[in-house]
Amino acid sequence: MSIDVNNESGTEVDEQAILDIARYALARMRIHPLSELSVIVVDAAAMEQLHIQWMDLPGPTDVMSFPMDELRPPAKDDEEPPQGLLGDIVLCPEVAKKQGEDAETQHSMDEELQLLTVHGVLHLLGYDHEEPDEKAEMFGLQAAIVDGWRGERGLTGPSPAPTVS
């Protein structure tokens, strides 16, 4: 997996954890090992510009995903996954910090960024949460991936609850 993490936010974030959880999520979703992903961490002003430009919504948001080759997980276990460019995930640590503090199960900014990275990966893979059944599927996968990654690392305590809308 070729994953680039570029922190342009001016905020110190755990870039290695973002890289590791993105790699874990892509492997868990059976995405081709030669696929490429870019994760960009930006400040609130840059995220707000993207949010307005692409979603026509005011204010910064937590995560945005920009798919490229529209890769999807293989439908069958014996199916060969396609190789390609997944796209870009853009994260905003300022929003992540606030969401982590405001969450029912309070957690750190870095834990929220890890959750948002998985959320962004799932959006790149075609998952959405507009409808209740889609939300249940996507958030179930998101929780399973975050829990699996945390479990492999022996991290204790509750996993962050989904705070993305």
Image (cartoon, helix red, strand yellow):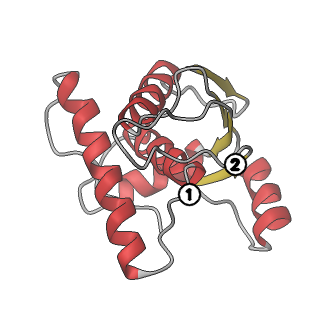
User: In the displayed structure, does residue 54 sit left or right of residue 36?
Assistant: right
**Residue at far front of view:** 78
Do residues under tags 2 and 1 come within 8 Å of each other at their CB atoms? yes
- Label for residue 126? 1
* Among the 4 quarters of the image, the one containing residue 148: top left
- Label for residue 147? none
Viewer-side residue, 150 vs 57 = 150
User: In the displayed structure, does residue 32 sit left or right of residue 103?
Assistant: right
Q: Residues within 10 Å of mark 2 (few under 14, many from 20)?
A: some
Residue at 49% x, 50% y: name it.
122
User: In the displayed structure, does residue 80 sit left or right of residue 7?
Assistant: left
Which numbered disc flags the more N-terminal residue, 2 or 1?
Answer: 2
Q: Secondary structure at mark 2?
A: strand
Q: Residues within 10 Å of mark 1 (few under 14, many from 20)?
A: few
- Quarter of the figure with the N terminus: top right
**Residue 39 drawn at (x, y percent):** 64, 33
**Residue 156 drawn at (x, y percent):** 14, 32
Residue at 79% x, 56% y: name it.
50
Q: Secondary structure at mark 1?
A: loop
Q: Is residue 101 above or below residue 117?
A: below
User: How many marks do you count on the picture?
Assistant: 2
The Cα–Cα distance between marks 2 and 1, rounded to whole angstroms, is 9 Å
Viewer-side residue, 65 vs 72 = 72
Residue at 81% x, 66% y: name it.
52
**Residue 108 drawn at (x, y percent):** 36, 41
The residue labelled by disc 2 is 67
Give the amino acid at mark 2. Pro
Residue at 61% x, 27% y: name it.
35
Give the amino acid at mark 1. Gly
**Residue 157 drawn at (x, y percent):** 14, 39
